[in-house]
Amino acid sequence: MIYLHLFLSYLKIGFFGFGGGYAMISLIQNEIVVQQGWLSNTQLSDIIAVSQMTPGPIAINCATYVGYLVTGNIWGSLLATTAVCIPPLSIMLLISMFYKKLKSNRYMQGVLDWIKPMMVGMIGAAALLYMNKETFIDWSSILIFAGCFFASWKKINPIILIAIAAVVGLLIY
């Protein structure tokens, strides 16, 4: 029965996860921690950190790890990963069939223009979900983030920013 719940949960996340992996984090947190109660916020926070460090899309990495933790075996990983991939793949196949005909349609442009700010909001919601007492990032990290954000706004090369942030983080921590 856990396999069915896992499959349906990640199928739902896949269908409503517009905006990519970071936008899906708030959906994953709601479904896995709040609705199902399979993991705590701290456990999910650790999973997200590991998912960011491993190659591949964060939502798929997260699904793989959560599937394994929930079921205790590789079949749960495969099931959750497959479930989160089915909806976007299906939707993209459908959209690609009609995109050429609809790309100049004003209604289609309206939908696409509406989705962009929604994605930014979902990514912001995911960030705010993890600003609580047990997972709050310290002020040094916030200052490093603010410095990198400002520097990227000034069009500084992201590779240089990553290197500088890594050196500053090593010096501080």
Image: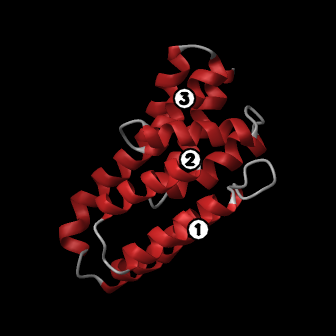
SS label for mark 1: helix
* Residue 86, percent from left and from top: 41, 40
Q: Amino acid at mark 2?
A: Ile
Residue 8 vs residue 94: left or right? right
* Residue 119, percent from left and from top: 50, 68
> Residue at image x 56%, y 13%?
73
Task: Say above or below: 171 vs 78.
Answer: below
As measured in the structure, the alpha-carbon distance from the residue carrying label 3 to the one carrying label 1 is 30 Å
Q: Amino acid at mark 1?
A: Leu
Where on the picture, by quarter, is residue 71? top right
Q: Which residue is mark 1?
A: 143
Q: Decide: marks 2, 3 in contact (CB < 8 A)?
A: no
* Residue 77, percent from left and from top: 51, 24
Q: Which residue is mark 3?
A: 65
Q: Nearer the viewer, mark 3 or mark 1?
A: 1
Dot label at residue 13: 2
Q: Earlier in the sequence, mark 3 or mark 1?
A: 3
SS label for mark 3: helix
* Residue 20, percent from left and from top: 44, 55
